Amino acid sequence: MTEKRYWFNCTVIAACPNCGKQSVEKLMMASLSENPDLINEKTKLMQFACQLCKKPFPDGVALEIGVFPSGEHDSDSSVN
C-alpha cells in the first residue's frame, strides 16, 4: 500500500552571527500529513549554515521559518 505524501515549500531566514548578513534558505519537504506545523517542528530540529559565508549557525540562533503547501502531492512511495 502506498501512502499519500504532501509537499511543502519552506523558507528559513536568520541573521548570521558570523558575517552579520541575512541568510535565506529555501527547502522543499514532504510529509505524510497535511499539517504544516509538523514540518515547522521538524525544520526547527535541523542544522543550518549561512548561505553567504557558509559557516554553521551556532545553537540558539533565531530562525524565522515559513511553511507553505506547494499544492503538489503524490501517492507513489518510490518518489524521493
Image (spheres, rainbow, N blue to C red):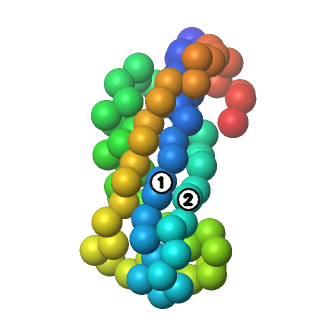
Residue 73, compared with residue 79, is above or below; it is above
Residue 74, compared with residue 59, is above or below; it is above
The percent position of residue 74, horizontal first and vertical second, equals 63, 16
Q: Residue at x 53, y 17 (%)?
A: 3
Please state, as top left, top right, bottom left or bottom right, where the N terminus lies in the image: top right
**Sequence-first disc among 2 and 1:** 1
Q: Residue at x 28, y 74 (%)?
A: 60
Would you identify the image quadrant in which residue 67 lies? top left
Outermost front residue: 21
Q: Please give left or right for residue 38 compared with residue 31 in the image.
A: left
Q: Please give left or right for residue 23 compared with residue 65 in the image.
A: right
Three-letter code, disc 2? Val
Mark 2 secondary-structure assignment: strand
Three-letter code, disc 1? Val
Tag shown at residue 23: none
Q: Residues within 10 Å of mark 1 (few under 14, many from 20)?
A: some
Can see residue 49? no
Q: Residues within 10 Å of mark 2 (few under 14, many from 20)?
A: some
Q: Residue at x 54, y 66 (%)?
A: 23
Q: What residue does disc 2 label? A: 24
Would you identify the image quadrant in which residue 72 lies? top right
Residue 60, compared with residue 6, is above or below; it is below
The percent position of residue 63, horizontal first and vertical second, equals 36, 60
Q: What residue does disc 1 label? A: 12
Question: In front here: 12 or 32?
Answer: 12
Q: Please give left or right for residue 19 compared with residue 54 in the image.
A: left
Q: Residue at x 55, y 35 (%)?
A: 9
Mark 1 secondary-structure assignment: strand
Please state, as top left, top right, bottom left or bottom right, where the C terminus lies in the image: top right
The reply to whether the C-beta atoms of the residues labelled 2 and 1 are less than 8 Å apart is: yes
